[in-house]
């Protein structure tokens, strides 16, 4: 865990102290501050460290199945319950369970959870037999739980039971001294991952980085460190280049405006950069697919069978469609050269693409497309898709529902 600010150290101290007890802990803090590391510290420093540790993202499990996931079910207790199943509370007996996004739990599950916390008892879905379990619960949320209890979304008794020991993880902007340290660590990690020299920050870039608002906290910082590590040729990052990576909606918190670029143009520039970034990743994937294809063809003695031919055609089609989408997205409706195009001297190209203007994709469509592709790339695994997209699993879950991508 990187960081040395007094507020972070205090949170770590509390986690270590409380680990020796079996008290419930509620970790709060904005999204992306690093809450997930704390239950692991608590588990590792506790007498339960040789027992199981199970992390559950309550916000990512559909309401209809969460009781069964947490507490198990009996055979035939609902359609599709073909066999008996153990829940996490049974499996984690003797260990620790981490309930992330605990504020998202439905009411029926809150009742069951309260019973486990108070009596160490639970009942499987479809059963009448009371079972015992000895599990330490650590929960986390980025919601205002007092407000949630006031609005009746979260049971007050459960909130106080969970909140026996509260640990607050401060947002990144309140531990400025950690920002450059974290960036260096991520720059080294990504240099290793992409086999490139690490990006280094000039003095003014360090200042800008430290004074930025970081609404998405460490997750956002990590995401930006990755973008920079992949895209920037010059491995010494200056303040003016860094600014182009920081979303403009938080730019007012920076000491000065961009070198003469208008806000709308900057917004458009940022959207385009994200799309180009996506193109780079897609191209890398295509390269790997191609290498695999060539390898398969060589193994088959140079013969291309029907399946391989179909795969090649599919790849060509996907690439043509993506290039077309990308082109239409970066053409502004008023036929104006965008900031990116100006910067790259591609003004002529825009005036030649009138027929594309009507097809311009909305940001929502682009977002939907990116989410669909990320899910495909990770074979439906939301955790990895969310990581690639730089959003939380809960946000991804919400967007999947919103866009009907199930
Ligand atoms: N101190 C740290 N040092 C290095 N990496 C960190 C640190 N804290 C967090 N991270 C990284 O930042 C990212 C976000 O952290 P994490 O998922 O724990 O945030 P969170 O507070 O649980 O967010 P959410 O509420 O959205 O689930 C992760 O990739 C994590 O590995």
Image (cartoon, rainbow, N blue to C red):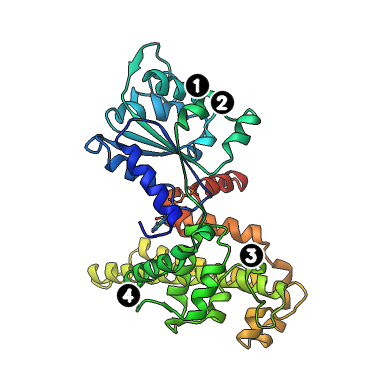
Asked if the beta carbon under badge 1 is closer than 8 A to the nearest atom of ligand 1, the reply is no
Q: Is residue 248 left or right of residue 196?
A: right
**Can you identify the residue that label 2 sits on?**
155
Residue 157 pos. (x, y %): 53, 23
* Crowd class of label 3 (few under 14; some 14 to 19; many from 20; radius 10 Å): few
At which x and y percent is residue 249? 66, 64
70 vs 201: above or below:
above
Nearer-N-terminus badge (2/4): 2
Q: Nearer the viewer, mark 4 or mark 3?
A: 3
- What distance separates the C-alpha of mark 4 from that of mark 3? 32 Å
For disc 4, the marked residue is 195
Residue 304 picture location, percent across and down: 33, 68
**Nearer the observer, 69 or 27:** 27
The secondary element bearing badge 3 is classed as helix
Q: Is residue 11 left or right of residue 205?
A: left
Look at the numbered disc 4 and give the secondary structure of its residue.
Answer: loop
Task: Say which residue label 3 marks.
Answer: 250
- For the residues labelled 3 and 2, the Cα–Cα distance comes to 35 Å
Q: Are marks 2 and 4 in contact (CB under 8 Å)?
A: no
| Residue beneath the point at 27% across and 35% down | 52
* Number of residues whose C-alpha sits closer than 10 Å to that of mark 4, classed few (under 14), some (14–19) or many (20 or more): few
Among the two numbered marks 4 and 3 on one chain, the one whose residue lies closer to the N terminus: 4
């Amino acid at each position: 865990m990187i960081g040395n600010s007094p507020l972070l150290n205090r949170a770590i101290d509390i986690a270590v102290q409380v680990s020796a007890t079996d008290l419930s802990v509620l970790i709060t803090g904005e999204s992306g501050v690093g809450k997930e590391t704390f239950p692991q510290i608590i588990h590792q420093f506790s007498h339960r460290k040789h027992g199981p540790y199970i992390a559950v993202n309550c916000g990512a499990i559909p309401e209809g199945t969460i009781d069964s996931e947490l507490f198990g079910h009996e055979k035939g207790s609902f359609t599709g319950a073909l066999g008996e199943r153990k829940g996490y509370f049974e499996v984690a007996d003797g260990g620790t369970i981490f309930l992330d996004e605990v504020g998202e739990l439905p009411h029926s599950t809150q009742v069951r959870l309260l019973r486990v916390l108070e009596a160490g008892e639970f009942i499987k879905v479809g059963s009448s037999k009371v079972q015992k379990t000895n599990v330490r619960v650590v929960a986390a949320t980025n919601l205002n739980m007092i407000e949630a209890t006031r609005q009746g979304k979260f049971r007050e008794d459960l909130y106080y039971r969970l909140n026996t020991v509260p640990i607050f993880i401060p947002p990144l902007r309140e531990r400025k001294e950690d920002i450059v340290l974290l960036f260096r660590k991520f720059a080294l990690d990504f240099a290793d991952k992409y086999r490139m020299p690490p990006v280094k920050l000039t003095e003014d870039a360090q200042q800008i980085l430290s004074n930025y608002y970081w609404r998405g906290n460490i997750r956002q910082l990590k995401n930006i460190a990755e973008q920079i590590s992949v895209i920037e040729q010059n491995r010494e990052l200056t303040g003016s280049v860094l600014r182009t990576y920081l979303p403009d909606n938080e730019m007012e918190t920076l000491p000065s405006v961009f070198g003469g670029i208008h806000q709308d143009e900057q917004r458009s520039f940022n959207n385009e950069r994200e799309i180009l970034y996506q193109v780079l990743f897609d191209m890398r994937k295509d390269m790997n697919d191609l290498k695999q294809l060539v390898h398969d063809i060589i193994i088959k003695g140079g013969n291309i069978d029907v399946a391989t031919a179909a795969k090649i055609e599919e790849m060509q089609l996907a690439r043509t469609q993506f290039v077309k989408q990308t082109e239409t997205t970066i053409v502004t409706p008023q036929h104006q050269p965008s900031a990116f195009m100006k910067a790259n001297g591609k003004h002529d190209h825009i005036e030649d693409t009138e027929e594309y203007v009507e097809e311009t994709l909305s940001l929502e469509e682009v977002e939907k497309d990116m989410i669909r592709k990320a899910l495909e790339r990770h074979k439906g695994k939301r955790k990895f898709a969310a990581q690639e997209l730089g959003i939380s699993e809960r946000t991804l879950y919400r967007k999947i529902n919103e866009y009907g991508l199930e």
